[in-house]
Image (cartoon, rainbow, N blue to C red):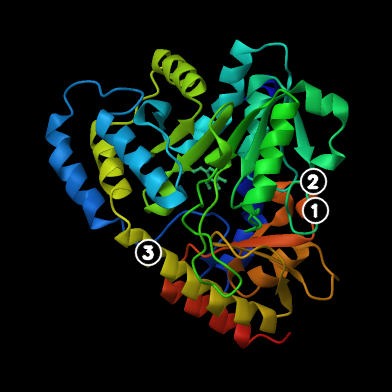
Amino acid sequence: MSDGFVPPTFPQDRLGELRAVAAAVPGGSIDTSVGTPVDPVPEVALEALRAAAPGSAGYPPSIGTPALREAASGWMERRFGVRVPPEAVAACVGTKEAVASIPRLLSLRDPSRDTVLYPAVSYPTYEMGAVLAGLRAVPVPVDSRWRLDVTQVSADDADRALVVWLNEPANPTGASTPAGQLAALVDWAHAHGAIVASDECYAEFTYDASGAPAPPVTALAGGSERVLAVHSLSKRSNLAGLRVGFAAGDPELVGYLAEVRRHAGMIVPTPVQAAATAVLDDDVHVDEQRERYRRRRAAALAALEGFGLVHDGGTSTFYLWLRDADDASDGWAVGSRLAEHGLVVAPGELYGPAGIDHVRLSLTVTDDELTLALGRLASAPV
Ligand SMILES: Cc1ncc(COP(=O)(O)O)c(C=O)c1O
């Protein structure tokens, strides 16, 4: 490949050495570095896929079938108590592509703004969406609880912002923002003329400090004008392999994005739209999954503390955000120490320089794998 065609390095591709060390441990490695679900695909999804497959001869609507948009609207009303009409919902092919492309599509509409703001410790695709759009990527500092601290954004960056990304609750820290504070962030972005894009893909895995389910919050709570909420079925319903999500909110914005995406041929396959509709109408499988992650979180926290790590992230999502209890090592060194016991985690620097002292552990491993990993740590000298 010539020098002109070197792509950016994919974050998890930096883990080669940690993975090799962990793989050499007798019994093999347990890799928690990627948040890829491992639990069962819900039966309702499988039934819907089977039933819809014969009807796949023609093109499905890019914006989503009426049934899917209705189901998404119904779910948002049920879970968040917000009324988003089906007309203000549009499907996407998993939310990563939406996150990566929204800044570009919005910049076509408003070339006067050249900046994307996103949390300084966050999912790397917010930054990549700015890069792909040729826009300035400006991280917003986070406070000691990993919540956005917009007081530290310069007036120039704020006034040039095309879009402000929120992630509620947040990857990789598990932090959640109280509803009032979230509303204040939306107001702040609007006061500077920016559009709010709120990635809420972990909303179903919101817990309080005791591990009890807590009501999720949405950036749409105060109204939909200039707000987009982005939702994924990958995590909620273990459907990452089917690639489906949706954006909902400001009808004008959603309509614009849907129409441009239609030109680009961004379409969720027919059986996948049917499966997404079915899972959005069902909460039982989500309750089961929420409980699985709660159990794994409790078990992992106890063992990791015994290994000399502290969790100082929030109580939500299925990620643990850990650092060395003595603050003696950074996230890469903690990662190396865990790899020697067969456990692969993601060093926090993958989520921005401000994450350097931490590692992220994803609870997307089976119960058996987690038991094996934690057992190894328990028998390791601290
Ligand atoms: C914060 C966040 N947003 C979006 C995504 C993308 O999920 P998907 O493309 O599977 O919908 C992920 C995946 O890990 C994520 O962590």
- Callout 3: few (<14), some (14-19), or many (20+) C-alpha neighbours within 10 Å? some
Residue drawn at x 61%, y 37% is 125
- Callout 1: few (<14), some (14-19), or many (20+) C-alpha neighbours within 10 Å? few
Asked if the residues shown at circle 1 and circle 2 are in contact, with their CB atoms under 8 angstroms apart, the answer is yes
In the rendered structure, find residue 143 and report the number of the disc placed on it.
1
The residue tagged 2 is: 149
Side of 182 where 331 appears, left or right: right
Say which of 342 and 224 sits in front: 224
Q: Which amino acid type is marked by label 1?
A: Asp
Say which of 220 and 91 sits in front: 220
Residue 65 drawn at (x, y percent): 27, 29
Q: Secondary structure at mark 1?
A: loop
Eyeballing the image, is 36 above or below 253? below
**Quadrant in which the C terminus is drawn:** bottom right
Q: Mark 2 or mark 3: which comes first in sequence?
A: 2
In the rendered structure, find residue 287 and report the number of the disc placed on it.
3
Residue 113 drawn at (x, y percent): 73, 17
Q: Secondary structure at mark 2?
A: loop
Residue drawn at x 30%, y 61% is 284
> Residue 348 sits in which quadrant?
bottom right
Eyeballing the image, is 286 above or below 13? below
Residue drawn at x 71%, y 32% is 189
